Image (cartoon, grey):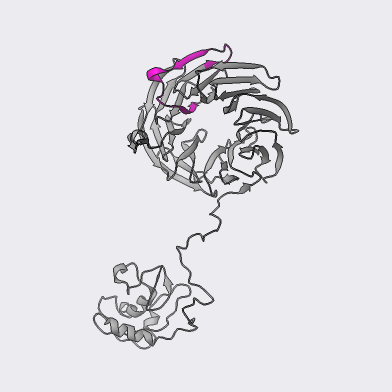
Amino acid sequence: MLGCTACRRRSAHVCPDRPEDRSAANLCSCVAVMEGAGAGDGGGSGPPSPEPDGAAAAVLEFHEDEEIIEVLELNEGDPDPDDLASDMEDVDFADEPEDGEMGDEEWETEDEGVEEGAEPHDDSELTYAKHTASVFCVSLDPKESSLAVTGGEDDKACVWRISDGETLFECKGHKDSVTCAVFSYDSTMVATGDMSGLIKVWRVEDAQEVWSFEVADLEWLEWHPCAHVLLCGTADGNSWMWKIPSGECKTFQGPNCPATCGQFLPDGKRAVVGYEDGSVRIWDLKQGNALHVLKGSDAHSGPLTCVSSNSDGSLLLTGSVDCDTKMVNTASGKVVGVFRTESNVSKASKREEGEAETNSVESVGFCSALPLAAVGYLDGTLAIYDISAQVLRHRCQHESGIVQLLWEENSPVVYTCSLDGAVRLWDSRTGKMISEYCGHSAEILDFALNKDASIVVTASGDHKAKVFCVQRPDR
């Protein structure tokens, strides 16, 4: 904002007394008073012709509380700066504050930022603040999407209602940060797991613990898509599967390195697990053997960070710290595509003072409405690939690293959360951002989307979870 030396008002327009900023579209209202008299005769560009008192004001349009303080009469031609300054000394300003003070009413400006110490702009409908440390994970109950479970660095998980934030019960007894917290397919049970490997299952109806088990350091945990069966991966390379609550168990032994990511395939008969050595295994859950092993040239050159299947389980996406995303046919176990962008490859391989610049694939997913795949990178790139032609369609840049992405069901819209604390919606057809939702004062570490894509629940390093009602322009 600039203060006009002719009228001493703060204005969104630029004052002509600053010639470096003057343009035909940026004139302070005081200039209209001085030059407007000439406009009444047909709008010539020459100097104003004499008018009776008040005639100049009659042709002016004022906005809101604007008023003429004094009309300065300028000589023909360019005004002498010394003469103008002398005229300004005689202008009488009512109730002008003394000693340079602003007075009772401060000038209003349009570009005032958030004051230091003030809360950031918050688009959320509800904030859940019952955790006392960073919130690492969140899940919504798949049946009604009315309950959320969050786990955090405070060694506990909480089951709560997203409508009013009321805590139904706390999942206590963990010995370390709770990094996994998920509902069963029918929303009747909640499984929670901490970093040390203690896993507990709770019955939602009466908040009772019904089963627990302890494994090596836990990497990930998820429920079967249509049964009370749990699958997890651990730092010793094993994957474990249990029937709940009986506890019947199977183990799937991988290489001697952590099982860094994994999931059930949609048929419920197979599971895919990625490992720190870059290999991938597709397991037959009934027989307990590996149907396919991707290693050597088919494997990644760095640890796996994420895996995801398409809706029928025929294709997999695997992501790694090597910045490659591989597409795998689950029937043959063959790599049928590799997605990479030049900028991300160069960043992954760039050396500065002997160290690699940090970048990796953090999240991957297939679109169920179009033959597209999305890849989220730690450098903030969201890449949309055409899986038929295996080409990059769009690159959507975030200012901070992407933590996770989720596709809206049967829609070309993809959601991202990032380290800058915002959730964003992107149209994969155009690569344009649809909307953005803010409110956290720290990074978002996880988020969940309900079935009809109307609610997003986030977990953040600011010790809070938030509920956002997503406004879609096409609804």
Q: Is 443 part of what is drawn in magenta?
A: no
Name the quadrant containing residue 10: bottom left
Is 197 placed left or right of 79 in the picture?
A: right
Q: Does 106 sit left or right of 3 as displayed? A: right
Which residue lies at the image location 45% right of the left edge and 72% below the top edge? 63
Task: Decide if residue 96 is on the left or right side of residue 227.
Answer: left
Residue lying at 67% horizontally and 24% vertically, measured from the top left:
213
| Above or below 95: residue 1 | above
- In this view, the residue in front, 205 or 355, is 355
Nearest the viewer among 458 and 298 is: 298
Q: Position of residue 443 (x, y in %)?
A: 52, 44
Number of on-image labels: 0
Which image quarter holds the N terminus? bottom left
Q: Position of residue 54 (x, y in %)?
A: 39, 85
Stretch in magenta:
283-310
Foreground residue among 116 and 226: 116
Q: Quadrant of residue 42?
A: bottom left
Outermost residue toward the left? 77
Residue 48 visible in this rendered orientation of the protein = no
